[in-house]
Image (tube, rainbow, N blue to C red):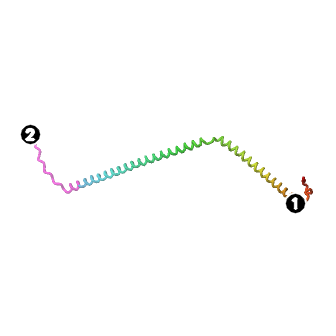
Amino acid sequence: MTGDPPSVPPSRPPEPATADDVRGLRRWVLVAGVWAVAATAIAVIALVTANRDDDGKEQSARASGQISRVQSQLTNRLDDLESRLDDLAPAEDVSKLDRRLKTVEEAASKATDRLDAVGDDVDDLQSRVDALERQLESGTDTTETGTETTP
């Protein structure tokens, strides 16, 4: 024995690929292609969704700004109304004015009633004066009627 290691047997030449080997390789290439298409579709969907979210954020920011503006306008309007209410007379003054107005209305009503009575008296006196004038024109004596006349 010699101290030399055994020699490596010569390698066999590669065998040519068979039809089954080509079919198997084709199958794995198709599977890899399907996975690539699926990954691309998922990436596109994620990109579109991200863009929509950005648009949604922009719309949300715009809506938030509009809401803030409307709130500010409403606050200003409420402040204006409060200042107007503060400038108005207090309820006590209004109730005093209401009582005074009722008193004036009652007095006006009484005056109207008295004026109507005076008008009726004037109409009565006018009719009596007309009757006396007719009697004077006709020459009749008014003493028979019970009315006194002074010359």
Percent of width and height locating residue 112: 75, 50
Q: Which residue is drawn at 16% across and 54% down?
A: 16
Residue 6 highlighted magenta (yes or no): yes
Q: Which SS class for mark 1?
A: helix
Quarter of the N terminus within the rendering = top left
How many residues crowd around disc 1 within 10 Å: few (fewer than 14), some, or many (20 or more)? few
Q: Which of 88 and 12 is in front in this view?
A: 88
**Amino acid type shown at disc 1:** Glu
| Separation (CA) of disc 1 from disc 2 | 185 Å
Q: Which residue lies furthest to the right in this view?
A: 144
Q: Which residue is drawn at 54% across and 45% down?
A: 77
Among numbered discs 1 and 2, the one appearing first in the sequence: 2
How many residues crowd around disc 2 within 10 Å: few (fewer than 14), some, or many (20 or more)? few
Q: Is the magenta stretch mostly helix, strand or loop?
A: loop
Magenta span: 1-25
Q: Which SS class for mark 2?
A: loop
Residue of label 2 = 4
Residue of label 1 = 137
**Amino acid type shown at disc 2:** Asp
Percent of width and height locating residue 137: 87, 60
